[in-house]
Amino acid sequence: MNSYDSISKLLGDKASFYLEHVCEKITKDKLNSPNKNFIKNVFVSSNRNGQVLRSLSQLYNHGNLGGTGYLSILPVDQGIEHGAAFSFYKNPDYFDPENIIELAIEAGCNGVASTFGVLGICARKYAHKIPFIVKINHNELLTYPNKYDQTLFGKVKDAWNMGAVAVGATVYFGSQESDRQIKEIAEAFSEAHNLGMATILWCYTRNDAFKTTEKDYHASADLTGQANHLGVTMQADIIKQKLPDNNYGFKNIHFGKYNDEMYESLTTEHPIDLCRFQVANCYMGKIGLINSGGSSGGESDLKDAIITAVINKRAGGSGLILGRKAFQKPLSDGIELIKAVQQVYLENKITVA
C-alpha cells in the first residue's frame, strides 16, 4: 500500500473532505507555495544577508524533507512552558537533553527547537549534526498567579556561539505585555539577522477576553491570522501558529476592524480554508507557516497529526512543528509518528488545494 492509500485509509470517511477540497476564496495561484526553490524565490531578493540565506538553507535542506520546501521540526521547550514533571512523566528519558536531540536526528527532522540549557549542554556534540533553533524566551510557570508574559532567558549572541542556525521566540499578541514583547523580540530578531541566523516566531494570542461563555477564540482564524501578520512584520522568517479551529473572533468579541464582507470574501468554515487564511496573512506564503502538532491524546495522536499535516499542506503551509505527540511516547513510537507526518509532505498526490 502506498503512502497516499495509507493516509486515505487513516482518514476514513473524511478522506474526500480533506483530500479533495478546493479552496475557492483565496485560490492557490495567489500563493507562494513551498517547493525546492523556495529560498531562492523568496529570500534572495529580500533584505536578509547571505549568512541568513545559508542558515535558512541548512534548515530547509536537512532531514527527510530536505530540499522539498517543507519543514518537520521537533520543539521541546515544554519543560519550562508546561512544567518539566508534567511534560516528561510519561517518558522520563527526556529529562536528559541528549535524548531530545537524538529523537530529532533519528526521526529525520529538519531541526530541533529547544531552550538555551537543553541545546547548550549538548552543543559541541550535536550542533554540526542537526540544525539548532534556540528558543530565547519563555513563559516560566512558577509565577503565581501565572501571567501572559514571555521572559528572555539568554542573549542572541549566546545562540550564535553554540552554532544555532536560528532563534525562536514567542509573542503573546493581545496580552497586556505584548507591546514590550514585540519591541523586545523585533530587536532580538534584528540582531539574529545581523549575525546570520534565521528567525522563527511563535505567534500566540493571549487575553482572557478572547474566551467568551460561548467559545474560545484564541485559535480563531481571524485572530491568529492577524497575529501572523504582525509576526511577518517583525521579519520572522518562519511563523509558528496553532491550527485554527473557528472564526469570527473580531466580530463576536466586538473589537478590532471587521465586517461581514471580509469574512465572506476570504474564507469558509472548512478547516483548509481557515488555515489558508493564516497562510495569506504570512505574505501569501512568502513566509512559511508551520502549524503546531498540539497536545498528546493517546491512541488518536497519529490520526490527529496526519489530519493537521494534510490541512497545513493543502492550505499552502510549510510543515509541522510537532513535539508532545512524539516525545511523550517511547522513542520508537515517537520516531514512527514523526516519519508518518513527513510522508504527508513527501506524497505528491497530496497537493495544495
Image: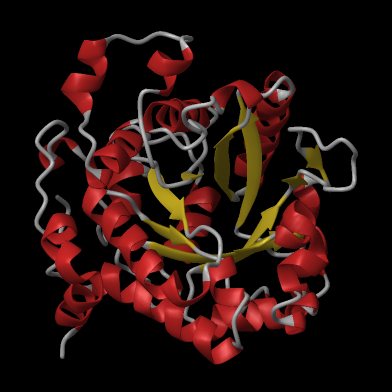
Residue 20, quarter of the rendered image: bottom left
> Hey, which residue is sitting farthest front in the picture?
213
Q: Nearer the viewer, residue 230 or 125?
A: 230
Q: Nearer the viewer, residue 153 or 198?
A: 153
What residue is at 28 percent from the left and 67 percent from the top? 345
What residue is at 23 percent from the left and 69 percent from the top? 11
Residue 14, quarter of the rendered image: bottom left
In percent of width and height, residue 29 lies at 11, 40
In percent of width and height, residue 107 lies at 49, 82
Q: Quadrant of the N terminus?
A: bottom left
Q: Nearer the viewer, residue 13 or 41?
A: 13
What residue is at 16 percent from the left and 33 percent from the top? 26
Residue 126, quarter of the rendered image: bottom right
Image side of residue 28 versus residue 336, left or right: left
User: Where 68 falls versus 258 (above or below)?
Assistant: below
User: Where 290 falls versus 189 (above or below)?
Assistant: below
User: Where 332 falls versus 161 (above or below)?
Assistant: below
Number of numbered callouts drawn? 0
Q: Is residue 15 visible?
A: yes
In percent of width and height, residue 110 lies at 48, 69
Image side of residue 242 versus residue 117, left or right: left
User: Where 156 falls versus 299 (above or below)?
Assistant: above
Q: Is residue 285 visible?
A: no
Q: Nearer the viewer, residue 194 or 258?
A: 258
Image side of residue 291 versus residue 25, left or right: right
In percent of width and height, residue 271 lies at 27, 45
Q: How is the image coloured?
A: secondary structure
What residue is at 16 percent from the left and 86 percent from the top? 2
